[in-house]
Amino acid sequence: MSTVTPAAEPQYAAYVGIDWGDREHAWALEVAGSGKIENGKLPQTPEALEIWATDLASRFGERPIAVGVEQSRGALIYALQKFSHLVFYPIHPNTSTSYRAAMSPSGAKDDPVDAGLLLDLVVRHRDRLRCLHIDTVETRKLQALVEKRRQLVDERTAQTNRITDLLKQYYPQALAWVDDLSSPLGVAFLQCWPTLQKLQKEPPEVVRAFFLQYGSRSQQRIQERLDGIQKARPALEDPAIIDPCVLMLQALLDIVTGLRQGIERLQKAIDQIFAQHPDAPIFASFPGAAKVMAPRLLAAFGSQRDRWESLQDFQNYSGIPPVTVRSGKSRSVHFRWACPKFLRQTFHEFAAISVQQSEWARAYYHHRRHTVNQDHQAAVRSLAYKWERILYRCWINRTPYQETIHQERLLSKATPAPSADHKPKTEPPRPSKRPNENPVHFEFKKVAGFWKISDQTS
């Protein structure tokens, strides 16, 4: 397992806890070794924040100051991270809430008191907190772009679902004629013919030319649409329902068009930054990463190799491994709740895509589904856990991934296949029928009670 030696902690001149707010922040400060606490309030304005940070730098001679705050991003962090003498320790809200409950069982709450509790966590329990690492400009920019792109994709999905619900009310046939409501073809089709009555008045040649113009090249598919249009009957003819639905549809189509254009602009910016990043070849080498997932994987790891002490440290932070709850004789394993959701989503989605692109990943997925009897999501998370180990090693070593080399390593560690007279109690999953170009074919065989990966040709 790869490990990285963490950088030594600086000698802090002071410690600060900030209970942030929308308009005003409460802070508590303790000079190192003094034991005395100072309190104050700070307006959320760029001018006030800069004066406060500059005064601290002048007071302590630019020596480092540890700052505990309940956020790792946001207006406060973004405004103060430019000051090199401030070292941030993000504190999870659940941690501070539980700490407050432990210190004040009565349930009392006050902003200055909360700032003091955050200060106490930084001073006495700093070893259990993770220091905020400010990455390079290009990496942080890529991280922001890929996350905002995904936000637009999710919003487009939400608006497309609203369009689907609307069409089911008065124009359900359109859902069969348009494969993707958010595509240029889908939007243009509904803009031209928002009702079945208007569509059926259009000559078939015009409709055919429309589909050809928007890239539909299958003559059979076009003819099926034309036949369906001629045979279709209106779901309803009540203008009190149809007219408001049409106006709502037009408004939603404008939103979807704007979202699609925004996604394209963000993707263009992502492509430009990713192409220039020194770690781009590493993540572009993974099967199925392509132009969307490769930048997201790079953003997930960042550029600072000393950020993580070990692979396990990174995996726990990503949220992919489950957590164990044990008390007395009871024991349960469940999905990890507290983690960066977008980070976990990145590895989960990449693992799902890799099933179609990597033979060993496909074999492992089918093994988890049909032999271990996991559901789809659990099997993908299990595969993501495997991929994280490979991604981490390639990232640490700055080495692109090679499928054939990984397959050879898997086979070199595998137990030899059992003899012909050995019959496992449970049949292994059937090999995938999907053709691929990988030179080695895998399956799982049961040996001495354990399922092992092996070469099908052995």
Image (spheres, rainbow, N blue to C red):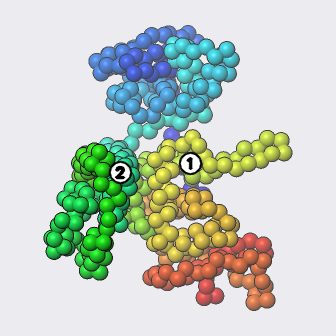
Which residue is drawn at the image coordinates 55% and 77% (left, top)? 408
Q: Is residue 389 left or right of residue 144?
A: right
* Residue 213 x %, y %: 17, 70
In which quadrant is the N terminus drawn? Answer: bottom right
Q: Position of residue 440 (x, y in %)?
A: 53, 82
Tell me, yes or no, if residue 281 can be seen here. Answer: no
The residue where tag 1 is placed is 319
In front of the other: 227 or 419: 227
Q: Is residue 67 visible?
A: yes
State which tag comes first along the sequence, 2 or 1: 2
Helix, strand or loop at mark 2: helix
Question: What residue appears at the point 80 percent right and 45 percent down from the top-left corner?
Answer: 330
User: Residue 208 vs residue 328: left or right?
Assistant: left
To which residue does mark 2 refer? 166
Q: Residues within 10 Å of mark 2 (few under 14, many from 20)?
A: some
Q: CA separation, marks 2 and 1?
A: 37 Å
* Residue type of the residue flagged with mark 2: Leu
Mark 2 vs mark 1: in front: 2
Q: Is residue 21 above or below residue 458?
A: above
Does residue 1 lie above or below 139 as drawn?
below
Rendering quarter of residue 361: bottom right
Which labelled disc corresponds to residue 440? Answer: none
Q: Position of residue 241 (x, y in %)?
A: 31, 47
In the rendering, at what x and y percent does residue 157 appear? 37, 52
- Front residue of 184/342: it is 184
Name the amino acid type tagged 1: Gly
Residue depicted at 65% across the width and 71% down the height: 370
Q: Quadrant for the C terminus, please.
A: bottom right
Residue most toward the front? 238
Compared with residue 253, is residue 200 higher up or lower down, i.e. above or below? below
Q: What SS does tag 1 mark?
A: loop
What residue is shown at x 78% (from left), y 85% (from top)? 422
